[in-house]
């Protein structure tokens, strides 16, 4: 029988919170001068991985990104602010929330997008490995912790449904 690895000690949410700032350059934009959706998705993935890595201190791979909407366009020269935080840690995976804002030349900020990403911690042989639990510190963090558990149940049910449909 394989030996069960023990989980590392839990860490507070505040240790994972991260902020990433990007300026939209012409190379990041479409012909209309607006930020490419794929570039924003890449930045969201990086911001999520940053928070996840700060929590686990291990290599991570992206397992999923929940639905993503682009609420307002971001123009060349404007600033994109991505804030990320671990919402919940499971045995080998964790959910990270990323919220994105744009800052216009005037200083006005607008919400651009939000996403939930699931990452899996891997060892050098690319096998999942145990990660620390998370300690929510504020009421908002406790709410996000609970909601992350519900989203995980939905994701797992959807995966089971897809596997069952594929087996027909």
Image (cartoon, rainbow, N blue to C red):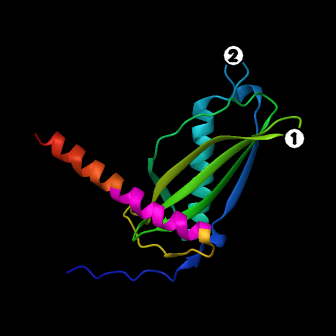
Q: Residue furthest right?
A: 106
Q: Residue at x 54, y 47 (%)?
A: 115
Pointers 1 and 2 in contact (C-beta within 8 Å): no
Q: Residue at x 59, y 41 (%)?
A: 42
Q: Residue furthest left?
A: 168
The relative height of residue 54 versus residue 65 in the rendered view (above or below) is: below
The relative height of residue 75 versus residue 156 in the rendered view (above or below) is: above
Give the residue pinned by disc 2.
31
Rendering coords of residue 136 (x, y %): 57, 74
Q: Residue at x 66, y 45 (%)?
A: 100
Frontmost of labels 1 and 2 is 1
In which image quadrant can residue 103 be found?
top right
For mark 1, give the secondary structure: loop
Q: Residue at x 41, y 67 (%)?
A: 92
Instruction: Specify the segment rendered in magenta.
Output: 140-153
Rendering coords of residue 127 (x, y %): 36, 63
Rendering coords of residue 87 (x, y %): 53, 64
The relative height of residue 69 versus residue 2 in the rendered view (above or below) is: above
Tell me the quadrant of the picture where the C terminus can be found. Answer: top left
Give the residue pinned by disc 1.
107
In which image quadrant can residue 56 be found?
bottom right
Question: Of 62 and 104, which appears nearest the observer?
Answer: 104
Q: Residue furthest top?
A: 31
Please say whether residue 8 is one of the residues in the magenta stretch: no
In which image quadrant can residue 86 be found?
bottom right
Please say whether residue 146 is one of the residues in the magenta stretch: yes
The relative height of residue 114 versus residue 105 in the rendered view (above or below) is: below
- Asked whether, in this view, residue 129 is left or right of residue 13, the answer is left
């Amino acid at each position: 029988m394989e030996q069960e690895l023990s989980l590392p000690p839990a860490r507070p949410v505040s240790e994972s919170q991260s902020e990433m700032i990007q300026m939209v350059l012409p190379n990041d934009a479409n012909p209309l001068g607006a930020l490419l959706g794929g570039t924003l998705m890449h930045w969201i993935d990086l911001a999520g991985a940053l928070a996840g890595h700060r929590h686990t201190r291990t290599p991570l791979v992206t397992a999923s990104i929940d639905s993503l909407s682009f609420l307002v366009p971001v123009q060349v020269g404007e600033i994109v602010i991505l804030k990320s935080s671990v919402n919940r840690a499971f045995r080998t995976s964790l959910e990270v929330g990323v919220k994105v804002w744009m800052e216009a030349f005037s200083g006005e900020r607008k919400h651009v997008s939000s996403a939930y990403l699931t990452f899996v911690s891997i060892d050098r042989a690319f096998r999942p490995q145990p990660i620390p639990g998370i300690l929510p510190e504020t009421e908002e963090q406790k709410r996000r912790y609970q909601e992350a558990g519900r989203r995980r149940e939905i994701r797992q049910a959807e995966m089971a449904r897809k596997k069952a449909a594929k087996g027909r």
